[in-house]
Image (spheres, grey):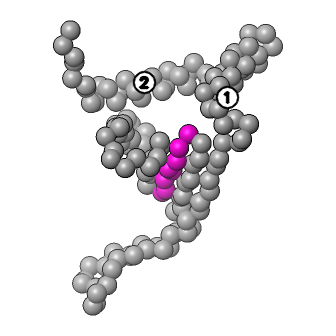
Amino acid sequence: MTAPDRPLVDLEISSCDAYPRYTYQLQGSRGGLAGTTSHLDWRYFDPAMAPAQVLIREPLPGPSYCSEELPWQQASWDVPQEQEDLFHSMSGRIYSNLYDVLTKGAALVVTPAEVRQQIAVIEECHRQNPLPRLAE
């Protein structure tokens, strides 16, 4: 999935994994992210800090293997203990924010424009990968 001046997005959603390890697994051109709803790990590199890449056209001598050394950065995140009940924690934040918006003039944490963008991405995924219709 892509559009002018937008990155290419290849989205695969599946529960057909015999060895599911992660709820989320994202692969990007400069790193990735993997984790569950309570723990995330991510690694990335800054291309400006990466060594220059040289294309080698001739055969490598002996039993040689291609390799590259990238200056990986990595970090992780864990849900704070007081928020381990994710459903109540997340829904509580949404409703508390909505209450603050309606009673105190606070800004929405999730704006309608962000929701529209998420819906547009989901609709485009369905347009490019239509599901078979069930018999009625």
Residue 33, image x, y percentages: 51, 50
Left or right relative to 24: residue 113: right
Q: Residues within 10 Å of mark 1 (few under 14, many from 20)?
A: few
Taking 99 as reference, is 56 left or right? left
Q: Which residue is mark 2?
A: 120
Horizontally, residue 90 falls left or right of residue 105, namely left
Residue 61 visible from this viewpoint:
yes
Disc count in the image? 2
Q: Position of residue 17 (x, y in %)?
A: 33, 45
Vertical position of residue 135 compared to residue 43: above or below: above
Residue at x 37%, y 23% (from the top left corner)? 123
Q: Is residue 34 magenta?
A: yes
Q: Residue furthest right?
A: 104
Q: Residue at x 59, y 60 (%)?
A: 74
Residue 13, given in percent of the width and then of the height, sits at 36, 37
Q: Residues within 10 Å of mark 2 (few under 14, many from 20)?
A: few
Q: Amino acid at mark 2?
A: Ala
The C terminus lies in quadrant: top left
The correct choice, above or below, for 62 with respect to 134 in the image is: below
Q: Which mark is residue 64?
A: none
Specify the quadrant of the image occupied by residue 100. Answer: top right
Screen quadrant of the N terminus: top left
Q: Which residue is the site of mark 1? A: 89
Q: Magenta part of the protein: which range?
A: 30-37
SS category of the residue bearing label 2: helix
Q: The disc labelled 1 sits on which kind of residue?
A: Ser
Q: Residue at x 42, y 43 (%)?
A: 7
Magenta run includes residue 66: no
Residue 113 lies, with reference to residue 6, above or below; the image says above
The kind of secondary structure element at disc 1 is: helix
Tag 2 near tag 1, CB within 8 Å: no
